[in-house]
Image (cartoon, coloured by chain):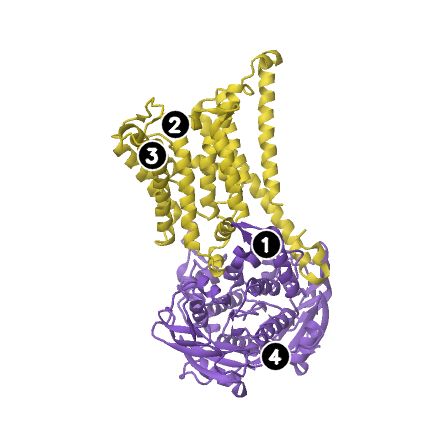
Chain colours: A yellow, B purple
Amino acid sequence: MRRSKEIGMVAIFLGLFFGYALLELIQRGPADTFANPVFLGQANLLNLTRSIGLFGIFSVAMGVVIITGGIDLSIGSQFSLLGVILAYLLGNYNWPWPLAVLAVLLLCMLLGWFHGLLITRANLQPFVVTLCGLLGYRGLARFISHDQTVGFSGDTTFELLRTLATGSIFNVPAPFIVFVFVCIIMALVLHGSVYGRYLFAIGRNEEAAVYSGINTKLVITSAYMLCGFLTGVSAILLGFYTNSISPASHGSFFELYAVAACVLGGCSLRGGEGSVLGIFIGTAMIQLLRNIVNLQGIDSSLEFVVMGGVILIAVVFDQVLAARRRARESRLDIKAAPAEATAKVGAG
Amino acid sequence: MSDTEKTPIVEVRGVSKRFPGVIALNHVDFAVYPGEVVALIGENGAGKSTLMKILGGLHRADEGEIRIDGKTVEIRNVADSLHLGISLIHQELNNLDNLDVGGNIFLGREPLTGGFLRLVDRGKIAKDSRAYLKKVGLELSPTTPLSALSIAQQQLVEIAKALSVNARVIIMDEPTSCLTLTETNRLLKLIQELKASGVSVVYISHRLMEVQACADRVVGLRDGRNSGILQRSEISHDSMVRLMVGRNLDLKKSVTRSGDPDDRIEIRNFVSPFFPSHQISFDMRRGEILGLAGLVGAGRSELAMTVFGIVKPLGGEISVNSHRIHIRSPKDAIQNGIYLVPEDRRKTGLITSMTVRENVTLPDLWTYATCGLISYQKELSSAETQRKKLSIKTASTNTLAKNLSGGNQQKVVLAKWLSLQPKLIIFDEPTRGVDVGSKAEIYKLMRGLADAGVFILMISSDMEEVLGVSDRIAVMREGMLTGILEAAEFSEEKVMKLAVAPVKTALEVAS
């Protein structure tokens, strides 16, 4: 029953994907399209999968905290702050890259720990805590860099990092491979592990989780740290992907792409719902839409209009389906009421 | 009271209601005469609520007719029902607690003022509300926010609301499930007053003592059919149980008490942060069920929460067989074999949107995992074992907990703990909202655990339960432990004397 949502999403994604391929075929005619495909051309597909990879990793990060009933609005600003710091460490202070990467990852986990602490110990709302982060971290990034664009020098010692962001392995963009790897690990963590079960339990009913002996404060705090870690991984890839970081705009609004991917992928902002597969498809869908808007030459300022509209339609559609499912379940409830007699037909 | 020559106010004849796959009501007859209190009893799923919802305009009957004052009527919606003088007070109160008391009473029928501005006439609301509140014995300002009221008071507001629409029949669905004994008695008295003023009351309850105290007539339902009617003189506990389940409920005790006086859990000078000025000390003996009685707000649940580590105690100690244990969190409590079956199972006992299996294994999930990854097979087999052991009625262990009946949900909460090694289980209102059949099973389970050497502490506001199930009864009042009664001294009066403040000694059971 719960898988049906994701199957539906895959169907819609494939429909959109091949539908657009068909549209191009009609628009440009078969001869031209086959000789020189644009949408299904290698460059575009590489581009599409690369952006799915880059945006997917931090969407999964967002998913982790959304499942606990929280949110992290500071992701985009963290990209800016972490990017600036990484560039400084590598460029100005000449740290060896493994050390710089470690520092960045530790820093973003520290930020996550700090968020988690404020949420669980000071009982602040995740929205408020990370909203302050959204404002604060970008400000900090601009202050550190004197609001100047910073970049990575042509130094070859950290060529590996650059490859991870911009390179390809067997014609598959490296960020996409990293993303798939992250997805596999996170699917095990979220859907197979004790820790994952705790996250869902807390998202559904935090109080009952406490009464079952779960240290909810620790689990929630660690969720923000895990979110921070994946944000850090994304920050490094994004930094090298753009190669230059303008602190005022780098990663701006990216947290909203992540929220959108989660919501499209079946996460509930009330917590306790969501899956890695769903977030994967949600991300793919959003990047596909961006790609299509781009290829169709639609004014890029309309990009957000299209995405907003699609997400709205998806959510409304999902609500309608959920209402129908609830209606069906409540009919089954009545049926199951004299449980002895009708246990077999119960919740089928 | 029921005078057969009178025309019933409400009469239901041969009403049937089908839901897909089940017949909820099967040619049911039911009548309410002017100025009588008629109790409707039956197990969960017997069709009581469906019948009342038909009268209240929430469901429509598939078959049969409804007569008001002898005339056939059609009740299509709630407004029709209200118009005919029927007022339904739901089991879960539907008050809006962001409004004040007056606002709730006049919700949807607010008197207007200010001409075309159509402003709500607050003055009139206040004035009229006061009169109705006085009738139900609530002495508070109509501008009090509803959220400041206790459940009992909110219930009275609902009754005031029913009176304000000139209801002739007030249907109360499980009105006392959240009330203390004093509050219950006050409600029963109010019902007698309503009756005297000519209003009829339909009273749905699982608590047979209350039914016995207030009903003029008892109508039984079983599996959607009429199972019989008892006139006033025929009403007794046993006869009612027979109507509901077709068999007598057995509450026999089989105490196998440990002979060793040192085999006990001692709670010494224990201070919960809810009542920082009171120290509590008492012992629990192995093999007994210790009842913990008192009024709502006496600090019983708070004591349980503190023992279980939900909040940290301010002082005192707990020792099992003279070994002191330290509890700073529920995790500590669980590791020490101390478990809590909480009062509100939907809020704290269960994660209702998770499956039975996921709920059952939640407290000891680590034991089903290798390297942190859960083995579905191990988890499933444990859940299945518990399902069979406790005979939890569910289609499968992969059914969501919210789809189970109250009694079965309670068993799932219990199943969470039984796969571990329990030393002490605290039951907080274990049978609230549970039907008679499941109640008996839960009592049997508790007794079985006690016999197996588990310490049992049972918090209950149901006097029948406290007296019938406990081996000893501890009573609390306002955060203090006011006394412990041995089995030989059990009586309702003694418990109540300890439970209420000394000034209010004159307590009478409405009858």
Q: Which residue is mark 1?
A: B355
* Residue B399 seen in this snapshot: no
**Tag 3 subunit:** A
**Tag 4 subunit:** B
**Labels 4 and 1 within one chain:** yes
Q: Amino acid at mark 4?
A: Gln
Q: Amino acid at mark 3?
A: Ala
**Labels 3 and 4 within one chain:** no
Q: Earlier in the sequence, mark 3 or mark 2?
A: 3
Q: Which residue is mark 3?
A: A100
Q: Position of residue B107 (x, y in %)?
A: 48, 58
Compared with B210, A201 (above or below) is above
Q: Is residue A116 left or right of residue B463?
A: left
Q: Which residue is mark 2?
A: A240
**Labels 4 and 2 within one chain:** no
Marks 1/3: CA–CA distance = 45 Å
